[in-house]
Image (cartoon, helix red, strand yellow):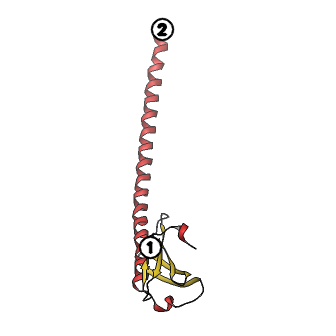
Amino acid sequence: MARGTRRGVALALVLLALLLAGALAAGGVMSAGRSMRDAAGSIDRVRAMAAAEQGLTLAVADWNGTWSSAGPAGLIATLPDSLPGLVDTVRIVRLTPGTFLLISESRSLSPTPLSARSRVSLLVTLDSALHPHPSLHHSWAELP
């Protein structure tokens, strides 16, 4: 083999190695950026879930006696609530005269495009004194 043909191979191998190293570095930078966005979004998701659960707790704690009175099935109340950086709405739906479904939805007001939403529900039954109590078993199959 002649000496002139071997010199070009070394240059090509060095350029290929630099190209691979650059591609790996670019992939690492993109992966780190994605991880940072995911971490920022998870904070908003946790805050939205906590606000939705708090909305259900407050709706049961601040139960309005007029909701317990007899009436047709359907939406009976909407409770808006605004916390710093969050919007929460609780809807109270009468299923039967003694059974209600509370649906709490919240969303973060994050200035980033990563705003989060959360929706939770709770099945509530009234006792003999017309006080609400969360149902022990809550599944969609139990709804009438």
In this rendering, would 35 be left or right of 142?
left
Dot 2 corresponds to which residue?
Answer: 2
Numbered disc in front, either 1 or 2: 1
Give the camera-side residue of 57 and 137. Answer: 137
Disc 1 packing (10 Å; few <14; some 14–19; many ≥20): many
Residue 61's spot in the image, x, y percent?
Answer: 39, 83
| Disc on the earlier residue, 1 or 2 | 2
Q: Residue at x 47, y 19 (%)?
A: 9
Q: Is residue 98 above or below residue 47?
A: below
Dot 1 corresponds to which residue?
Answer: 52
Helix, strand or loop status at disc 1: helix
Q: Residue at x 48, y 13 (%)?
A: 4
Quarter of the view holding residue 21: top left
Residue type, label 2: Ala
Residue 103's spot in the image, x, y percent?
Answer: 50, 75
CA separation in Å, label 1 and label 2? 76 Å
Q: Residue at x 55, y 90 (%)?
A: 70
Residue 72's spot in the image, x, y percent?
Answer: 60, 86
